[in-house]
Image (spheres, helix red, strand yellow):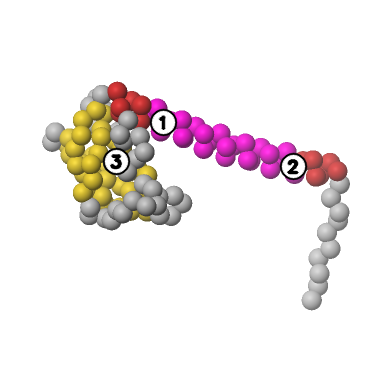
C-alpha cells in the first residue's frame, strides 16, 4: 500500500489556516446570534398586542433542535408556523395546542410550550 507523505506545514500556512477557521467560526456565531435576536424581537412584538387561539400540531421534529409546526386559523385565513419545545414537553402530531399570535401580524405566533408564552 502506498502511503502519501505530506510536507510539514510552514508557519505561514498554519497562520492562514488559523485565520480561515476563525473566520468561519465568526460567521456561524454572527448568524446564530442574529437569528436569536430576530426571534426575541418577534416574541416582544407578539407580546405587545396579541390574541389567543388553538392550533393543530402538523409536524414534530427533534432533528437539529426540537420544534413543532402548528396550523391555526385567524378570521378566515389559515397560518402555519413553527416554534420550539422543551425535552419534557409531551407533544405529538395531531395534538391541539394553545398559541399566542400578533393581532397586526397573525403569521407571528408562539405556542404554550415557549418559555415566553406566559410573559
Distance, label 2 to label 1, CA atoms, is: 33 Å
Determine the image quadrant of residue 7.
bottom right
Q: In this view, does 5 lie above or below 100?
A: below
Decide: few, some or many residues near mark 3? Use Cα within 10 Å; few <14, some 14-19, many ≥20. Answer: many
Range of magenta residues: 17-42
- Residue at image position (66%, 37%) is 23
Q: Is residue 15 above or below residue 119?
A: below
Q: Mark 3 and mark 1: span between their CA atoms?
A: 14 Å
Sequence-first tag of 2 and 1: 2
Q: What element carries label 1?
A: helix
> Of helix, strand and loop, which mostly describes the magenta segment?
helix
Q: Nearer the viewer, residue 25 or 51?
A: 51
Q: In this view, does 47 lie to the left or right of 86?
A: left
Residue 25 in the magenta stretch? The answer is yes
3 and 52: which is toward the camera: 52
Point out residue 43 in the picture as x, y percentages from the top left corner.
35, 30
Point out residue 9 in the picture as x, y percentages from the top left corner. Answer: 84, 50
The numbered mark, 3 or 1, whose residue comes first in the sequence reads 1
Residue occupying image coordinates x 63% and y 40%: 25
Instruction: Write down the residue under mark 2.
Output: 18
Amino acid at each position: 500500500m502506498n502511503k502519501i507523505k505530506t510536507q510539514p506545514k510552514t508557519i505561514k500556512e498554519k497562520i492562514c489556516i488559523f485565520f480561515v477557521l476563525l473566520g468561519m467560526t465568526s460567521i456561524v456565531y454572527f448568524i446564530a446570534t442574529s437569528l436569536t435576536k430576530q426571534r426575541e424581537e418577534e416574541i416582544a412584538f407578539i407580546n405587545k398586542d396579541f390574541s389567543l387561539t388553538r392550533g393543530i400540531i402538523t409536524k414534530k421534529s427533534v432533528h437539529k433542535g426540537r420544534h413543532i409546526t402548528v396550523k391555526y386559523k385567524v378570521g378566515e385565513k389559515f397560518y402555519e408556523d413553527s416554534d420550539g419545545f422543551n425535552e419534557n414537553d409531551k407533544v405529538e402530531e395531531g395534538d391541539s395546542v394553545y398559541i399566542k399570535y400578533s393581532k397586526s401580524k397573525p403569521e407571528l405566533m408562539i405556542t404554550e410550550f415557549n418559555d415566553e408564552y406566559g410573559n
